[in-house]
Image: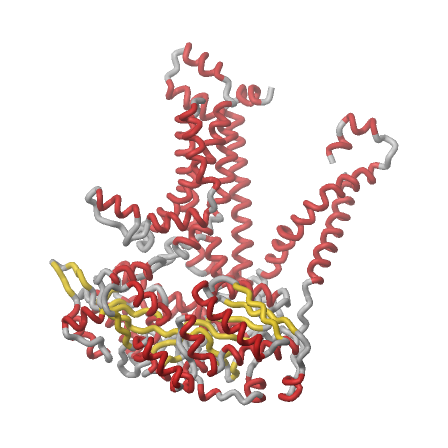
Amino acid sequence: MNKIKKALSVLAVSGMAFASILGCSGSGGSSSSGDILDAEEAAQDTTPITIQYWHSHAEAQLEGLDYMLAEFHKKYPHITVEPVFQGAYVDLHKKLQAAVAAKEVPAVTNVEVSVLPNFADSGVFADLTPYIERDQVDLNDFSQGMLQAYAYNGKQYGLPLIVSTSVFIYNKTLLDELGVEPPQTWDDIEAYNQKVALKEGGQTTRYAFSVPGWDTWYYDPWISNGGGSILNEDMTASTLDQPDSLRWIQNFYKWLQDGSLHMGFGKGASGDMRTMFLEGKIAMVQHTSAVIKTYLESANFEVGVSFIPGDKERKSHIGGAGIVLMEGADAREKEAGWKFIEFMTSAEHNINWAEKVGYLPTRKSAIESEEGKQYFERQPQYRTVFEHFDDVAPRLQHPAYPEFSEKYKEVVGEMILNGKDPTSLMPEAVKQINDILSDY
Amino acid sequence: MTGTEGPGAATNIKRRPKAWEYMKDFAFALPALAMLLIFIYYPLVNSFYLSFTNWNMTRPNKEFIGLDNYEKLLTGDTFYKVLGITFTYTVFDVLLTLGIGLMLALLFNVTSRFFNFMRSVIFMPHYISMVIVSMVFLWIFNSQYGLMNELLKFLGLEPVDWLTNPKTALWVLIVVSVWKGVGFAMIIFIAGLRGIPLEYYEASSIDGASKWTQFRKITLPLLSPITLFLVVTNFISSMQVFQSVDVMTNGGPLESTKAMVYWIYEMAFAEFRTGRASALIIMFFIMIVLLTVLQMYVSRKKSITKGRFISKCLHP
């Protein structure tokens, strides 16, 4: 028995040694976050280098990506960018977390806009400010809201790359027939509902409009447009149970009750909403601008696009992903990575990139250029979005957002699925949110 | 290891030091054990350590916070809610899979070309990856254009929002799991049935026992080792349900399908709470181990008291 024990301990030790060898071999990417090269040095260094670009560009965007990569390689022949598809945003983030823990990071990556604070908070992303200042990138040329979405605690951690915003997509043929315009303010909505919603024996056969309940991204701007807010100024407590912060959901509740508003909830609700819109059962849907193209292609009626209506203010939130530099990459990788980021977000290729991937241009100069004008001629539906170019606002930035947003989403779900009055449920949600906030 | 203990081995290699023999035996097991150590035991031990920290996987240093994670989990409502969902799922999944599996086994325990074919058809879902199964059922249970609702409409019934209704979503997940697992249970049960000597049935029918009595007094008790095996394996895999939740519901609607492993995943990778998720892993791990031991204990006791002669027959 003793010998077995002895042998076991030998085994255990050798096993651990093996594990530690494996563990050590993975620590290649040492970080040397010293000062960056000056402009001249950066231009002169042409020793070949290969960097990785982790992304979430789906199939439909690959053509655009290939084009950009080829153009980039023409401009900087010594830099080879290896694109690595890491799945949807959630999967990409998961792999990024693992990469950071293993200290083996790519130079450049995508990041979905809402989790930027989580990574930036831990010092995972490099501050781009020194590079921006050195190469004199004109930040004023970007849509300010889109730019701010990738800044956190006063540092610019990334630049907008894949930008969408939620808009109202409407059945223009139908609305023209009825002689109504999509509502521009909250005050217009009642009258719009009256004219558009169709009811037969207490059952709605055609909803006036639909607001997705499955993702807080869609109704967060409604909260602030109504004069409310999710958190207080110093982000220590939730204000969702305050009268102004309840206006949005009380309105939704009223319209749900009178059968003019449709709200989907849960997985698959997005597809259902789309089907209902295309079948004429919903006259207007709030959806991401990224799917305008899909609607245009599949509708057998004319499709219009309108910015979401406002009240105290009129904003819509930014969605999609940005492009960021990893702090853990070494100095030369970072230099090459920055060049790639600058190129991908440059005004020169902005329109081309946006059109190829079906997302929004981010640069004012690009929109105003000759190329930009042609773009709007080809895609007239996007014009209404760009009339509100600076009203595409950043989302609430807080590392606990992914966690606490579930709490008021649940209230929305209870309202949609079980017909409960949100005003009575919100205080409990606020309590839970404050509980989560107390950990930060 | 057993080689040196057996009588044959002892005479053959008497002269060699025993320690050397042990080392040699271990050397053969080393690759497999190293894999276990690296991919199972090391992560487990590390999770245990992480469960006392507030690490978020991206922060460079881990702050030790003692039992804080455990306290937060045990004092919150979600833990109990998720546990309830996981148990409901597990109990019905295991009962239905084994119940239907046994019925199918009794039905198809006949060797003929047709029944052989039927057995392979029923066993087929076992081969299909859970992700694919989930994708297919996602379509079948779609509320707008799903097959299930088309069927209901054809029968003149009201369509149901299967996956977007908190009352039905968990049941859809159970149906999917049962559909996939029932074939395996059937095959194992058939193997068990074929191990029961026919003499018992002949003898009991001479004594005038009805089919039902035979089933209760002979088939069920003699199948108990097989049943135990199926209960334990099904129980463990049901408790760990993840893929179908991830593909079909994302834990929703209104957290009605938020099973334990999905919650762990969500906490670690969507809410960036690696430390707390590790604490949950440890608690869940201990729970499964305890419940499995309990099951083994209870059913072993039962099968010994119920049929002493049976165990003699099985191991003469």
Question: Please, which residue is most extreme toward the right here?
Answer: B15
Residue at 29% x, 79% y is: A226
Give the quarter of the figure containing the N terminus of chain A: top right
Q: Is residue A371 above or below residue A271?
A: below
Residue at 35% x, 50% y is: B139
Residue at 69% x, 49% y is: B34
Return the x and y of residue A400 as percentages of the image width and height. 46, 71
Return the x and y of residue A208 as percentages of the image width and height. 20, 68
Return the x and y of residue A275 as percentages of the image width and height. 28, 59
A207 and A305: which is toward the camera: A305
Q: Quadrant of residue A40?
A: bottom right
Q: Is residue A4 above or below residue B285?
A: above
Return the x and y of residue A182 as percentages of the image width and height. 22, 75
Horizontal side of residue A252 vs A434, given as left or right = left
Question: Please, which residue is most extreme toward the left here?
Answer: A201
Q: Is residue B28 above or below residue A65?
A: above
Q: Quadrant of residue A169?
A: bottom left
Horizontal side of residue A157 vs B215, given as left or right = right
Horizontal side of residue A95 vs B153, given as left or right = right
Evaluate whether residue A437 shows in this view.
no
